[in-house]
């Protein structure tokens, strides 16, 4: 008998005036769902397969789930298995709504031809149905491995309004699975901020932004900031009078790429000061810690948490730390070999 009885399939499908009306518990507010959206079609296809293995299987558009949260109703909290369908963004959106929980996540990449989907275990392709049945059977039998992805926890005074996307779990209950980015609204301006890790004294940093990330996030935006192109390696080798042959270029590039990643269950919080202005006070543009304190000292700052952004006052203060184990996101892992290396 399955130890999972309730499953929620969450898809990326916009709210629209269309064929079906959904209401939020006792609220008199109704929402109309576009039933012809591909995301919902895939969601209902997964539902038809999952019903053979689990007791209750429901399908929800992610926008509807967020609207329900704004009415203080967390639709997802009663489900034991959550299946986000879409890309990594849909997966991150679902994760935003889960705090301290043993709920399991199993992501489905609905457009594998367009999305890498580092967080997603299943691909919606010609072999999907068979892989889906095998996966559900394994879950049904309890024959699965679970990857506990570490998360970051944010404490920001301005995060108080629970109707705001970043505050729906309540004040000081904002989590990031991938990364937190602090930057300036003006893309051509530097940001000045006081920066302190648990191991260091406060220092003033000027850069175009600071990204703080987990092992899950090391394959995302942070990697784009860290990577070194083969053309840059070629130029460096030439300047050192070293023959830049293809084998050596590929070997160095692969080594740098591997050094950028770390495992999603690692107890590490990494940070990078993007395009940092080097000065006498602070000249290290990256590192690791488990707790970071920041205080903005310039105008027009904003913060992005797993892609959700919010403007901040110019004197905003915040603490970003590695969340306790109870806040780990429990993700079903179907791969024998890690996709991170």
Image (cartoon, rainbow, N blue to C red):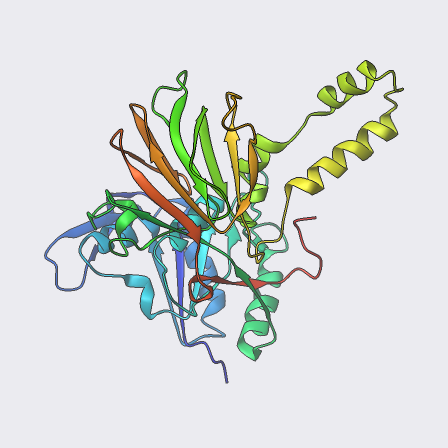
Quadrant position of residue 27: bottom left
Tell me if residue 323 can be seen: yes
Q: Residue furthest left?
A: 28
Query: In the rendering, at what x and y percent does residue 232 appear?
Result: 71, 20
Q: Seen in the image, is 284 located left or right of residue 183?
A: right
Q: Seen in the image, is 130 located left or right of residue 21?
A: right
Between 221 and 82, the residue placed more toward the observer is: 221
Q: Residue at x 53, y 76 (%)?
A: 140
Q: Seen in the image, is 98 located left or right of residue 53?
A: left
Instruction: Tell me if residue 135 comes above or below residue 283 in the rendering.
Output: below
Query: In the rendering, at what x and y percent does residue 214 appear?
Result: 52, 48
Between 45 and 195, the residue placed more toward the observer is: 195
Tell me if residue 112 can be seen: no
Q: Residue at x 12, y 64 (%)?
A: 26
Instruction: Tell me if residue 11 comes above or below residue 308 in the rendering.
Output: below
Instruction: Tell me if residue 15 comes above or below residue 59 in the rendering.
Output: above
Instruction: Tell me if residue 238 comes above or below residue 200 in the rendering.
Output: above
Query: In the rendering, at what x and y percent does residue 86 appear?
Result: 46, 47
Between 301 and 307, the residue placed more toward the observer is: 301
Total marks in image: 0
Q: Residue at x 36, y 61 (%)?
A: 99
Query: In the rendering, at what x and y percent does residue 156 appear?
Result: 29, 45
Q: Residue at x 53, y 21 (%)?
A: 278
């Amino acid at each position: 008998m399955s130890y999972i009885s309730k499953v929620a399939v969450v898809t990326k499908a916009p709210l629209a005036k269309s064929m079906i009306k959904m209401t939020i518990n006792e609220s008199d507010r109704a929402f109309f769902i576009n039933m012809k959206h591909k995301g919902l079609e895939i969601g209902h296809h997964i539902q038809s397969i999952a019903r053979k293995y689990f007791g209750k299987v429901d399908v929800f558009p992610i926008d509807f789930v967020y609207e329900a949260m704004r009415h203080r109703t967390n639709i997802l909290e009663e489900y034991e298995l959550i299946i986000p369908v879409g890309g990594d963004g849909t997966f991150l959106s679902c994760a935003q709504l889960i705090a301290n929980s043993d709920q399991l996540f199993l992501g489905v990449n609905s457009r594998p031809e367009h999305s890498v989907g580092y967080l997603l275990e299943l691909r919606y392709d010609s072999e999907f149905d068979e892989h889906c049945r095998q996966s559900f059977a394994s879950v049904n039998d309890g024959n699965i491995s679970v990857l506990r992805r570490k998360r970051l926890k944010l404490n920001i005074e301005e995060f108080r309004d629970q109707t705001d996307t970043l505050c729906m779990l309540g004040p000081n209950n904002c989590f990031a699975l991938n990364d937190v980015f602090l930057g300036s609204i003006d893309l051509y301006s530097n940001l000045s901020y006081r920066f302190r890790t648990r191991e260091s004294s406060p220092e003033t940093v000027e850069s175009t932004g600071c990204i703080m990330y987990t092992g899950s996030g090391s394959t995302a935006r942070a990697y784009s900031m860290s990577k070194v192109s083969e053309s840059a390696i070629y130029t460096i080798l030439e300047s050192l009078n070293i023959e830049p042959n293809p084998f050596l270029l590929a070997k160095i590039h692969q080594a740098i790429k591997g050094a950028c990643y770390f495992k999603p269950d690692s107890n590490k919080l990494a940070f990078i000061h993007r395009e940092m202005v080097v000065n006498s006070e602070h000249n290290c543009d990256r590192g690791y810690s488990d707790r970071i304190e920041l205080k903005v000292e310039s105008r027009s700052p904003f913060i992005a948490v797993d892609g959700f952004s919010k403007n901040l006052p110019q004197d905003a203060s915040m603490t970003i730390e590695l969340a306790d184990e109870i806040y780990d996101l429990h993700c079903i892992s179907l791969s024998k070999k890690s996709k991170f290396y």
